[in-house]
Image (cartoon, rainbow, N blue to C red):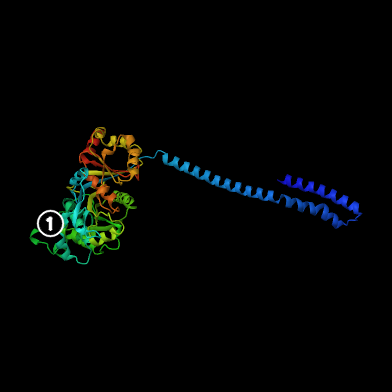
Amino acid sequence: MIKVIVSTILALILITSSLVIYYWRDVQYDPTGMDMLQFFILLPVCAGLLLLSPWLIYTSLKAYQTGKAQKLEAAKNKEQHLQQQSELEKNKEKPVEELTLKVYSSAAIHSFGENQDIIDAMQAFKSPELDETLANHYGLPILSYRIRSLDELLPEAEENDTLHSMRVQRINLLIQQQMEQHSESLYHIATHLRKSAMFYDAETAYQYRMHPGWINEQFDEEKETDIPVEQVARLNKLNLHILLPATLIHLWPDETQQKLIEQLEQQYEIVQSQIHVEFHYVDHNNAYSLWMNLLNDIQQQNELVSLVIAVQSEIDQEWLEQQLWQSEQYLPGEYAASICLSSLQLSIEDLTEIKTIKFVKHVKNISEYLKKKSPNFADLLQQEAAFILFLDDPLQISTAKKVQQYLGKFGIELHHGLYCYAYLGGATEMKALFGILLCMQMNEDVITLAYSVQHPQTFFVYQPVSMVEELEQNAA
């Protein structure tokens, strides 16, 4: 570029100088020093720059565009390099992470029934029923997943609770129903808590040694028995975790926590200091991570036992009307599921676990993993019975493709899975949690899994205790 400019200016100087010299000679002009500077230097340079200006502008723009393109290319190459590094790190062989807990009891309720009945109805593709109470904008009855057994309890609940919505009342009833399903486990836990307090905790033991009539007005002195002092595994507290939809975060009554504590105190004679009740509000985005974090916390609590209850209800005309503005095809539903569990290190007197729940991550070959955990897994693949509960929406085209992509190569076919998503109504917040807990109610004799394609290398594995004992005997 510089050579072109210099060459052009030199050529113009030569031409201009020749013309000017011939002209001055003809007119016999005596030039001054300024004239020579202007005509021999400044004039050729200005003429050269003016002549070259289009080309200089074009060249400058082209150079600017080329530089910009190079910077974009460099940034793109850097991003691709970082992506490749990220993929390499992801593809590195990570060891399987496994978190295991004991399960003492579990329960689930749905409009289809309870526990195993729910699984049977889903496998039979049972439909929602016409709801005579709920109506759409036109006053016509709509379909719903209503638990009709709750309707019998509602008149009594309405008399005692006129301040709260129908939805809150039904959720409260579902919580009570699920707690009743764990009454045997809670009885043994309460007994163990008292024995543990007598042996390990003097302050709590003093509260137990106080006259029970001060704590329980219904106490019958004739039935009073001395609490034996004996050494047992230390158990400090019962945790009650209630998982509610996030839409209730500003509607759920604050006094419910204390009422549940007092109920457990009265019903199972547990002092309040040994009861902890916590509410968790779940939405579609945090459901999976909340459950994983909760399991991780329970696994580290070697002196605590937990009862987890997930509950949802939309059987409320006022709530339904709000949802129908967004979708006229909205389908209300209600359901609840619960599980009583603890860490492996904890042993509760007279209470035996029925299953273990394993949360496993980084499983690249689920078939190989399950063969180690279940001797008859190869036979299970040859059968048509479902042993996987899928947590995703089956109406999404990508769901079936991803299931086939992630699991098909290991011999697991679509008929090995059961989809619960479509049977849980319109709200999505609690569907994944209910599915994870409902998986406990599937075939009790084989290993079962809860799985989401959104987390392709993560599984919740439920293993019967008899299978665990068999594996331990074979290993020995």
Q: Residue at x 85, y 48 (%)?
A: 18
Identified by mark 1, the residue type is: Asp
Q: Nearer the viewer, residue 462 or 211?
A: 462
Q: Residue at x 17, y 52 (%)?
A: 181
Q: Is residue 476 visible?
A: no
Q: Which residue was labeled with disc 1?
A: 226
Q: Determine which quarter of the picture holds residue 352.
A: top left
Q: Determine which quarter of the picture holds residue 469.
A: top left
Locate the N terminus by quadrant.
Answer: top right
Q: Nearer the viewer, residue 23 or 376?
A: 23
Q: Give the image location of residue 167, x and y in percent.
A: 23, 60
Q: Is residue 423 visible?
A: yes
Locate the C terminus by quadrant.
Answer: top left
| Mark 1 Cα shell of 10 Å, populated few (<14), some (14-19), many (≥20) | few
Q: Give the image location of residue 207, x and y in percent.
A: 19, 61
Q: Give the image location of residue 313, x and y in percent.
A: 23, 56
Left or right for 393, reference 268: right
69 in relation to 174, above or below? above
